């Protein structure tokens, strides 16, 4: 497995114990460079209409569990969109 796949597997198993840096790697891989970075937040653009962003927050070097779940849902939606285009 690649590093990205390993991190995704860990995120799915335990969203409460994900390092912020790992979540940022996943977001950059799937959504590209963060369009906004500040001291504790990063915002990534998504390719769909509606609320086209992913917001993650650093909390004592850990990612917030609800944000990990949101990223997982966004990745699933992105993969569904890519599958439907094939």
Image (tube, grey):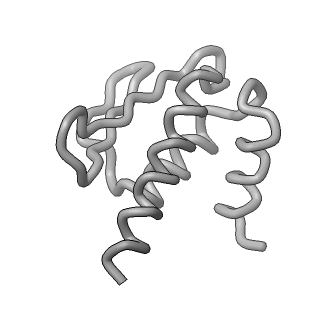
Determine the residue positioned at 58% across, 41% down: 23
- Quarter of the figure with residue 45: top left
In this view, the residue in front, 19 or 81, is 81
Q: Quadrant of residue 40?
A: top left
Quarter of the image that includes the N terminus: bottom right
Residue 51 in the image: above or below residue 57: below
From this view, report whether residue 80 is shown above or below residue 19: below
Q: How many marks?
A: 0
Spot the residue most to the left. 49
**Quadrant showing the C terminus:** bottom left
Q: Nearer the viewer, residue 34 or 13?
A: 13
Would you place residue 59 above or below residue 67 in this image?
A: above
Figure check: 40 above or below 35: above
Residue 63: where, in percent of width, then height?
A: 61, 26
Q: Position of residue 24 (x, y in %)?
A: 51, 43
User: Which x, y percent locates residue 79?
Assistant: 46, 63
Q: Position of residue 19 (x, y in %)?
A: 68, 34
Residue farthest toward the bottom in the current orientation of the protein: 86
Q: Residue at x 37, y 72 (%)?
A: 84
| Residue sitting at x 64%, y 23% | 65
Q: Residue at x 54, y 51 (%)?
A: 25
42 with respect to 48 (left or right): right
Asked if residue 12 lies left or right of residue 41, the reply is: right
- In this view, which residue lies farthest toward the top? 60
């Amino acid at each position: 497995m690649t590093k990205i796949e390993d991190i995704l597997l860990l995120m799915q198993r335990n969203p409460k114990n994900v390092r912020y840096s790992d979540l940022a790697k996943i977001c950059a891989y799937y959504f590209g460079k963060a369009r906004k970075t500040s001291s504790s937040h990063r915002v990534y653009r998504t390719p769909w209409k509606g609320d086209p962003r992913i917001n993650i927050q650093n909390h004592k070097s850990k990612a917030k569990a609800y944000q990990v779940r949101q990223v997982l849902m966004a990745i699933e939606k992105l993969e569904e969109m890519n599958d439907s285009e094939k």
